[in-house]
Amino acid sequence: MEFDETKLREFYSEAPADVSLADIDLGRIPRHVSLIMDGNGRWAEARGLPRSEGHVAGVDSLRETVTTSVRLGIDVLSAYAFSTENWRRPQKEVDLLMHLFATTLLNELPLFYQENVQLRFLGDITSLPKATREVFEEGLQKTSSHTGMVFALAVNYGARAELARAARLIAEDVRAGRLDVGDVDESAVEQRLYTEGLPDPELLIRTSGELRLSNYLLWQLAYTEFYVTSKHWPDFDRWDMLRAIRAYQGRDRRFGGVAAS
Ligand code: IPE
Ligand code: IPE
Ligand code: MG
């Protein structure tokens, strides 16, 4: 996607010692970067604060990462905010998160207008608490004509549930005579995922050090490069994004073939 180089250089002035914009090949920015935003609770606990403070602080990191991604000309930024397994958390924490999602989205809508960002959700948002669902629907509707970066937030998302849903949708289409069994191929599945129409992520970033997917984008991450940082999500900033992209650009992506010579 097009990006404004002056704005980009301004956003990335005052580089720390170990990384700068000059380390990045701006012609090879990944189209789709995905985030597993982990470690809010640990960040708060390390400061003697309640876990909720970590979630609140995490909002600032996400805002900065959205802006970073727009500045770099990334086409799609996706982020895992709440998994189908996160309902197992204490009710108080779940309530806080649902409230935080709604208030944050309302607060950040001006940024989406200013930067022409289109909002999408990955996951089943129909079963969220009414107040949260209504704000999400408003966000979808108000940004649907935006033509800039797509920001896809995964809420009540689980990859296994997503794949089971795709299988169900395919079965319904076959039963109704809209689809031949012989035409059930990879693209038939892709068209029925929440990420329909989006490119697969080239880069997945997970904060807080865990080396697992936690039921995230199992289909879409088949050939994605992983970057794991020990930093907790509220400490993740624009420079960490450059570090991740630099690492990505140093990888040899073979897709099952042999190394390019
Ligand atoms: C990520 O931080 C945010 C959500 C899953 C909602 P955590 O809340 O998982 O923080 P840790 O992993 O317990 O530190
Ligand atoms: C993954 O983090 C989900 C999100 C970041 C929303 P978790 O904290 O839920 O993952 P586990 O439990 O450590 O695998
Ligand atoms: Mg966690």
Image (tube, grey):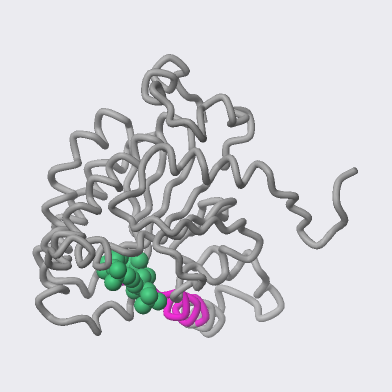
Give the farthest residue toward the top. 6
- Residue depicted at 40% across the width and 33% down the height: 70
Magenta span main SS: helix
Give the farthest residue toward the right. 261
Which is nearer the eye, 239 or 98? 239
- x, y (%) of residue 116? 32, 32
Residue 87 visible in the displayed image: yes
Please tell me whether residue 162 is drawn above or below residue 104 in the rendered image. Answer: below
Ligand 3 found in image quarter: bottom left
Residue 82 visible in the displayed image: no
In the image: residue 75, left or right of residue 153: right
- Residue depicted at 13% across the width and 46% down the height: 106
Which is nearer the eye, 205 or 223? 205
Please tell me whether residue 70 is drawn above or below residue 230 in the rendered image. Answer: above
Please tell me whether residue 62 is drawn above or below residue 52 in the rendered image. Answer: above
- x, y (%) of residue 43? 26, 61
In the image: residue 7, left or right of residue 221: left
- Residue depicted at 45% across the width and 76% down the height: 215
- x, y (%) of residue 97? 17, 66
Which is nearer the eye, 41 or 9? 41
- Residue depicted at 45% across the width and 60% down the height: 206
Does residue 146 belong to the magenta stretch?
no
Count of labels shown? 0
- x, y (%) of residue 200? 57, 55
User: The C terminus appears in which quarter of the rendering?
Assistant: top right
Magenta-colored span:
155-167
